[in-house]
Amino acid sequence: MGQAWLSAAGVKPLPEAYKLRFPDGTYTLLMHGDQLCTDDLEYQAFRQTVRDPSWQSMFLSKSIEERIAIAENLRNESRCVAQKKAKQSWM
Protein backbone atom coordinates (compact mmCIF):
# COMPACT_ATOMS: atom_id res chain seq x y z
CA MET A 1 0.00 0.00 0.00
CA GLY A 2 1.28 3.38 -0.90
CA GLN A 3 1.23 6.58 1.09
CA ALA A 4 -1.68 7.97 -0.97
CA TRP A 5 -3.87 4.99 -0.06
CA LEU A 6 -2.85 5.14 3.59
CA SER A 7 -3.69 8.85 3.74
CA ALA A 8 -7.02 8.38 1.98
CA ALA A 9 -7.93 5.58 4.38
CA GLY A 10 -6.81 7.63 7.37
CA VAL A 11 -4.44 4.93 8.64
CA LYS A 12 -0.73 4.59 9.25
CA PRO A 13 1.38 1.49 8.66
CA LEU A 14 2.62 -0.58 11.56
CA PRO A 15 6.28 -1.48 11.87
CA GLU A 16 7.43 -5.02 11.01
CA ALA A 17 6.86 -6.03 14.63
CA TYR A 18 4.35 -4.17 16.78
CA LYS A 19 3.76 -4.66 20.49
CA LEU A 20 0.06 -4.10 21.14
CA ARG A 21 -1.07 -3.30 24.68
CA PHE A 22 -4.59 -4.34 25.63
CA PRO A 23 -6.71 -2.36 28.12
CA ASP A 24 -6.07 -5.02 30.80
CA GLY A 25 -2.32 -4.35 30.53
CA THR A 26 -1.37 -7.50 28.65
CA TYR A 27 0.68 -7.34 25.48
CA THR A 28 0.75 -9.29 22.26
CA LEU A 29 3.21 -9.11 19.42
CA LEU A 30 1.77 -8.48 15.96
CA MET A 31 3.93 -9.58 13.06
CA HIS A 32 3.64 -11.44 9.80
CA GLY A 33 4.54 -15.07 10.31
CA ASP A 34 6.81 -15.12 7.28
CA GLN A 35 9.39 -13.22 9.31
CA LEU A 36 9.83 -16.42 11.32
CA CYS A 37 10.71 -18.56 8.29
CA THR A 38 14.39 -17.88 8.90
CA ASP A 39 15.57 -21.24 7.53
CA ASP A 40 14.03 -20.45 4.13
CA LEU A 41 16.86 -18.35 2.77
CA GLU A 42 15.36 -18.14 -0.74
CA TYR A 43 12.11 -16.75 0.64
CA GLN A 44 13.90 -14.28 2.91
CA ALA A 45 15.90 -13.01 -0.09
CA PHE A 46 12.67 -12.66 -2.09
CA ARG A 47 11.00 -10.85 0.81
CA GLN A 48 13.90 -8.41 1.04
CA THR A 49 13.78 -7.80 -2.72
CA VAL A 50 10.07 -7.03 -2.96
CA ARG A 51 10.23 -4.69 0.04
CA ASP A 52 12.92 -2.58 -1.64
CA PRO A 53 11.46 0.80 -2.70
CA SER A 54 13.30 0.77 -6.04
CA TRP A 55 11.96 -2.71 -6.87
CA GLN A 56 8.45 -1.60 -5.87
CA SER A 57 8.73 1.50 -8.05
CA MET A 58 9.86 -0.59 -11.03
CA PHE A 59 7.08 -3.11 -10.45
CA LEU A 60 4.39 -0.44 -10.12
CA SER A 61 5.57 1.21 -13.34
CA LYS A 62 4.38 -1.86 -15.26
CA SER A 63 0.85 -2.19 -16.60
CA ILE A 64 -1.74 -3.86 -14.41
CA GLU A 65 -1.80 -6.80 -16.84
CA GLU A 66 1.95 -7.28 -16.47
CA ARG A 67 1.73 -7.05 -12.68
CA ILE A 68 -1.05 -9.63 -12.57
CA ALA A 69 0.94 -11.99 -14.80
CA ILE A 70 4.05 -11.57 -12.63
CA ALA A 71 2.03 -12.20 -9.47
CA GLU A 72 0.43 -15.33 -10.95
CA ASN A 73 3.84 -16.67 -11.99
CA LEU A 74 5.28 -16.00 -8.54
CA ARG A 75 2.31 -17.76 -6.88
CA ASN A 76 2.75 -20.78 -9.17
CA GLU A 77 6.48 -20.92 -8.42
CA SER A 78 5.75 -20.63 -4.71
CA ARG A 79 3.29 -23.53 -4.83
CA CYS A 80 5.81 -25.71 -6.67
CA VAL A 81 8.59 -24.89 -4.22
CA ALA A 82 6.28 -25.50 -1.24
CA GLN A 83 5.21 -28.89 -2.62
CA LYS A 84 8.83 -29.84 -3.24
CA LYS A 85 9.84 -28.82 0.28
CA ALA A 86 6.89 -30.72 1.78
CA LYS A 87 7.93 -33.88 -0.07
CA GLN A 88 11.53 -33.49 1.07
CA SER A 89 10.49 -33.08 4.70
CA TRP A 90 8.74 -36.47 4.59
CA MET A 91 11.81 -38.25 3.25
Image (cartoon, helix red, strand yellow):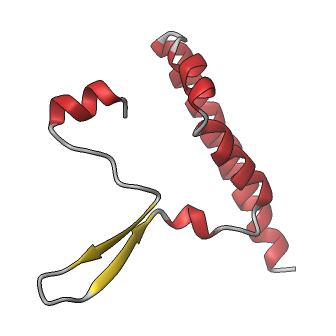
The total of numbered circles placed on residues is 0
Q: Is residue 12 above or below residue 7?
A: below
| Percent x, y of residue 27 | 29, 83
> Residue shown at 57%/21% (left/top)?
59
Q: Is residue 51 above or below residue 4?
A: below
39 relative to 50 in the view: left or right: right
> Residue shown at 16%/35% (left/top)?
9
Q: Quadrant of the N terminus?
A: top left
The front one of 54 and 89 is: 54
Quarter of the image for residue 30 reads: bottom left
Quarter of the image for residue 87 reads: bottom right
Q: Quadrant of the C terminus?
A: bottom right
| Percent x, y of residue 66 | 56, 15
Quarter of the image for residue 44 reads: bottom right
> Residue shown at 65%/41% (left/top)?
76
83 relative to 70 in the view: left or right: right
2 relative to 52 in the view: left or right: left
> Residue shown at 80%/80% (left/top)?
90
The front one of 18 and 36 is: 18
